[in-house]
């Protein structure tokens, strides 16, 4: 399946242009804006909790699933 994500396509094009021309001034925006380790850790570790607590529908689904999975063994005893 061919790649369609534009930032990845631009990185590949910049790499190809650097290789063909031998000039290192060609780069994609994704290559220039590399986040530092603090930003990466924030997005990896904190963002899931931020999304969980600031999305009311997600909170409702999580609570419903936790209650239903907790109570289902009690109702299905033989």
Image (spheres, rainbow, N blue to C red):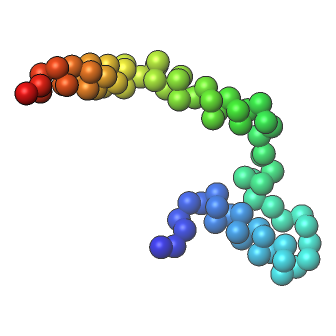
- Residue 7 at x, y percent in the picture: 64, 57
- Residue 29 at x, y percent in the picture: 74, 53
User: Which residue sits at x=80%, y=75%?
Assistant: 17
Q: Is residue 27 above or below residue 22?
A: above
**Quadrant including the C terminus:** top left
Q: Give the image quarter of residue 28.
A: bottom right
Q: Give the image quarter of residue 12.
A: bottom right
Which of the two residues, 76 or 31, is positioned nearer the viewer here? 76
Which of the two residues, 2 or 69, is positioned nearer the viewer here? 69
- Residue 49 at x, y percent in the picture: 53, 23
**Residue positioned most to the front:** 78
How many dots with numbers? Answer: 0
Q: Is residue 33 above or below residue 22?
A: above
Query: Quick check: can you spot residue 64?
Result: no
Q: Give the image quarter of residue 62.
A: top left
User: Which residue sits at x=84%, y=77%?
Assistant: 19
In the drawing, does residue 18 fall left or right of residue 74? right
User: Which residue sits at x=26%, y=26%?
Assistant: 69
User: Which residue sits at x=78%, y=45%?
Assistant: 34
In the drawing, does residue 12 fall left or right of residue 68? right
Which of the two residues, 53 or 23, is positioned nearer the viewer here? 53
Query: Quick check: can you spot residue 40?
Result: yes
**Residue positioned most to the left:** 78
């Amino acid at each position: 399946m061919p790649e369609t994500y534009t930032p990845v396509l631009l990185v590949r094009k910049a790499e190809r242009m650097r290789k063909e021309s031998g000039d290192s001034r060609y780069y994609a925006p994704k290559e220039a804006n590399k986040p530092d380790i603090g930003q990466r850790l924030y997005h990896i570790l904190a963002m899931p909790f931020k999304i969980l607590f600031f999305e009311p529908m997600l909170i409702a689904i999580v609570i419903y699933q936790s209650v239903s999975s907790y109570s289902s063994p009690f109702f299905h005893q033989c």
